[in-house]
Image (cartoon, helix red, strand yellow):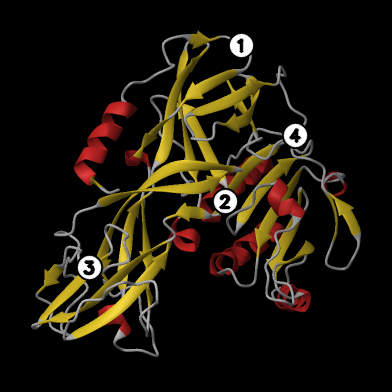
Amino acid sequence: MNKLLLSGLILLFLSCNKNKGVEKSIETGDFSVVMQKKIALGGKTNYTFRTLDSIPKELKAVPELDTVKLQYLIFRSSLEPDSIVPNKIYAYSGYDQGKFVISYDLNFNKDLTDDKKYYFDRPYGKWTRKDNYRKNIPYDTIQYLEYKEGNVIKDSLIYRVVPNDSTAVNPNDASYVEQVLKMDTYNHWWYGEFILNNEKYKTSIQPSSFLKTSITYSKLNEDFPQREDYDFVDTELKDTIEIENSYYRIDSISNDFSELFLKDLKIKERSHGVSSGEKIKDFKFNDIRFRSLSFSQLLVDKDYLLIDFWGTWCAPCLKLNPSVLKINNEHASQLSILSFAYDDKRNKVFEHVKEYQMDWNHVFLQRDLKDGTKTYPKILKELKIEAFPTFILLDKNRNILVRGTGEVSLNKIKEILLEKDKT
């Protein structure tokens, strides 16, 4: 069931360099892109095992050591959502003749006595974070079945089980830091290339652990957009994207992620969008005082509308609030500001707005319900707001001049307003 990492990487490298489907340039119409799994695009994710105080009935055998701590990690909830086979991996840590030892059920037979053991010269309570316990543990590949996009597909996961590097802690259990194990995994993406109107492009599909598939694209000689970019906007299935002055819908993905299908919408301009350079939909809403408003209403006698998505729980938002206040004071004659507070309690937002004299329009968006579940309001979904604070600057025609997160986007907004002052 398991393969050596080296073999897996060689196979993946060879398959990813076939570059299928890029020989012929597409001029117009619907088209598809052949995708290949590529580990190099993905990052790494780290998971923490759950410790056990008793031996589960399904375990056939457990080693006899000086001390031993049984642990497990559920694939279904922790690694890949709705993973089917296998659903968990058992492991243990402990001390054997003065040495720290770990092992895990590499063959998934529920027997912890027939697996390879890894020993470390790590006296109890006398190890430090700088010690690299990962370097001597190889990666393994597990093949499994999972449920994605409505279908059961075969997939693989490259992983290794390693000692805790002190990042996992439990204030109520001092021994937890010593005993708990972690799992390093590679997040593989799917990669493809295509030529449109003689311009070469690349695209990637990133299956997410949140039951959402993210898709990115760029010209072949450019970097993919990154979530760390201030102006990053997530792209998903059924979204509309612009390539070579034409609009395409990301229509579907094959069950095994080997092919991405795009549909030519045969339009040169769409009615509204969410990225810089596009026109935003004229949303209607009730403000914090229950008054009915819309984007267009706030632009009637102004040149610009600054939209701010924030929350009292968001430290970066609170840090930039004085800058937003300064923009309001210096550019009130040409600018309206509208702040959407994604927060737990309306009164908390109202008091914060009052205390800091945030004298502009505010909308409250409920974050947590009484039963503890979280909500994600419609406007956040439609505008793809995933980071806070997010700032959007509109001109009088609701065209998006700037969209981004944090101080970088706010500085770009200031530049536009200052340039306007000169005219």
Q: Secondary structure at mark 4?
A: loop
Crowd band around label 1 with a 10 angstrom C-alpha radius: few (<14), some (14–19), many (20+): few
Give the residue at mark 2.
211
Q: Of discs 2 and 1, which sits in the foreground?
A: 2
Relative image position of residue 133 (x, y in whole percent):
18, 66
Residue 161, quarter of the rendered image: bottom left
Look at label 4 and name its amino acid. His
Q: Secondary structure at mark 1?
A: loop
Look at label 1 and name its amino acid. Thr
Picture layout, residue 177 above or below residue 244: below
Q: Of discs 3 and 2, which sits in the foreground?
A: 3
Relative image position of residue 339 (x, y in whole percent):
73, 60
Find the distance from the CA under tag 3 to the CA under tag 4.
55 Å
Give the residue at mark 3.
103
Q: Secondary structure at mark 3?
A: strand
Q: Residue at x 37, y 40 (%)?
A: 41
Find the distance from the CA under tag 4 to the CA under tag 2.
26 Å
Look at label 2 and name its amino acid. Leu
Find the distance from the CA under tag 2 to the CA under tag 1.
32 Å
Give the residue at mark 4.
272
